[in-house]
Amino acid sequence: MLSKINSILLSFVFLPMVGCDFFKFKTAEEEKNNPVVATVDGNSLRHADLDFVTKETQGLADSTNLAKRYVQSWIKKQLMIKAASKNITISQAELDKKLLDYKYALIVYQFEKDYIEENLDREVSEEDIATYYQKNQENFTLKEIIVRSNFIKMEKTLSQNTQVERMLKRNEEDDRHKLRDLALKSATNYFLEDSTWIKFEDIIINTPLTETTNVVQLLQQNDFIKVEDDTYNYYFKILDFKLQDQVPPVEFVKDEISKIIINKRKVSLAEELQNQIYNRALENNEFKIYEQP
C-alpha cells in the first residue's frame, strides 16, 4: 500500500499547475538528468514530466507527436494562469483551499479506492438482504406492475395447443416437466421461470396484450389469460402479481439490496480509513489546533 501511495504522490509532483513542487525539492543532479523542455514565466516543464504521457504509445512517431501536443497544452495552460492572475483577484486562503480540494480529489480518491478494494467484503448473505429489506421496505415502492407467470407462445396450427392450455390452467406440479419439454420442442417462445418476478410489460411485449387498456383489472380478474392473433396463441398463467405503489417481494429487489449494502460498506471503509489516519496523527502529535481569537 505504501508503495502505491508513494507513486501517487510522486505523480502529482509533475502536474504542471502553478510551478510549485508540493512534496520535495529536486537536487542539482536530478535537474541535470531531467532537462527543461519548456518554460513560462519561471515555471518549467521537464523531460520527466512527459513520461506518463508517452509511456502507453506504441511507436516513436506517436510518442513524439503526443509529447509535442502535451507541451503546447502545458504552455497554453501556463499562459492562461499568468493572464488570469493579472485579471482576477483571489485571496491566498481561497487559493490554498482550492489547491487542497484539488489534491484531495486527485490523490485521496485513489488512496481510498485502493484501500476499499483491498478490504471490501463483497459477500452479501441472504440474512443481510432479509434484514435490510425488513427495515427499509418503504424505500422499494414499485413503479411498475410485476408478476410471477408462465408464458407460452404457440403456432395456432399445432395440435399441442390443447395440451398446453390444459396444463397451464391446472398448474400442477406433475405437469411442470412435461410442459417444459413441450415448450422446448413446439413453442415459438416461452417463459417458465415461475419463481422469478418479472415486469409485466416485459413478458407481454410483442403480444396482443400490449393493447390492453386496463391491465390492473385484467390481472385482478384472471389468473389464466389467452389471447391470439392471425398466427399465434399466447398463453399466460398468472401465479402472483404486485401493482404499482405496492412493496415488491424481496426476491425482486435482491440484487438492488446487495448493491446498496456493498456501497454502504464502501462508505464505512472510507470513514474507517480517515479515522485511522486521524487518530494515528493525533497520537503522534502531527497536527495542532489553535484556539480561535
Image (spheres, rainbow, N blue to C red):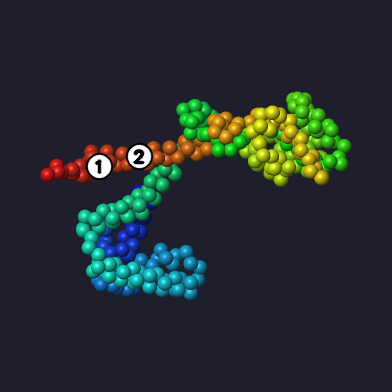
Marking on residue 70: none
Q: Position of residue 194 (x, y in %)?
A: 68, 32
Amino acid type shown at disc 2:
Glu
Kindly identify which residue carries mark 1: 281
- Label 1 SS: helix
Comparing marks 1 and 2, which lies closer to the viewer?
2
Q: Position of residue 218 (x, y in %)?
A: 68, 33
Q: Position of residue 110 (x, y in %)?
A: 39, 50
Q: Nearer the viewer, residue 131 or 87?
A: 87
Q: Nearer the viewer, residue 207 or 155?
A: 207
Residue sitting at 28 percent across and 72 percent down?
Answer: 40
Mark yes or no: residue 184 visible. no
Residue sitting at 63 percent across and 31 percent down?
Answer: 241
Amino acid type shown at disc 1:
Ala
Marking on residue 271: 2
Alpha-carbon neighbours of circle 2 within 10 Å: few (<14), some, or many (≥20)? few
Q: Nearer the viewer, residue 190 or 213?
A: 213
Residue sitting at 25 percent across and 65 percent down?
Answer: 88
Say how many tags the image has.
2
- Residue 11 lies, with reference to residue 125, above or below; the image says below
